[in-house]
Image: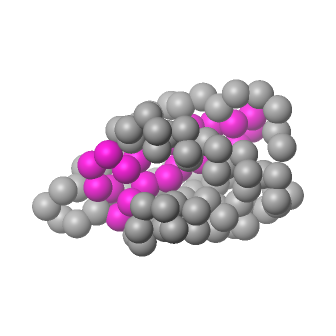
Amino acid sequence: MLEGKALVEDTDMPLQMQIHAMSSASQALDHHDVSDYKSIAGYIKKEFDSKYGDGWQCVVGSKFGCYFSHSRGTFIYFSMESLKFLIFKVASSSTSLSH
């Protein structure tokens, strides 16, 4: 596991979901090599799909740009050491916010 604290850069998630996101990221790093971004993201996505229902997306890396729509209350962007984590649930057109 990477030592250090997660730094939330932007979110609209409820606090308990934020804690779950950071805990899932830490667990993913325990199970996968820190450079295996795809496996880390897959681990987190499966964790969120299982707990909160299908439709979650996860992006992990050190440098990336994106523009997306998400359902209200389902977005978090945080860093942990040198990695950035973006987790969000795909939006329906009536409840979407863009980032």
- What residue do we see at 72% from left, 67% from top? 39
Occupied quadrant, residue 54 = bottom left
Q: Between 18 and 40, which is closer to the camera in this rendering? A: 18
Answer yes or no: is residue 70 visible. yes
Task: Write the residue at 27% across / 49% down.
Answer: 72
Color theme of the render: one colour
Which quadrant holds the N terminus? top right
Left or right position of 69 against 38: left
Query: Would you say residue 62 is visible in this rendering?
Result: no
| Residue 16 position within the rendered picture, expressed as x and y whole percent measured from the top left | 46, 39
Picture mark count: 0
Q: Is residue 83 left or right of residue 30?
A: left
Residue at x-position 40% and y-position 47%: 75
Q: Is residue 71 left or right of residue 77?
A: left
48 with respect to 27 (left or right): left
Which x, y percent locates residue 13?
39, 41
Farthest residue in the bottom direction? 54
Magenta span of residues? 70-90
Principal secondary structure, stretch drawn in magenta = strand
> Looking at the image, is 8 positioned above or below residue 93?
above
User: Compared to 8, does 77 lie above or below?
Assistant: below
Residue 30 picture location, percent across and down: 82, 52
Q: Is residue 86 magenta?
A: yes
> Does 16 lie within the magenta span?
no
Rendering coords of residue 71 (x, y %):
29, 55
Q: Residue at x 38, y 38 (%)?
A: 14
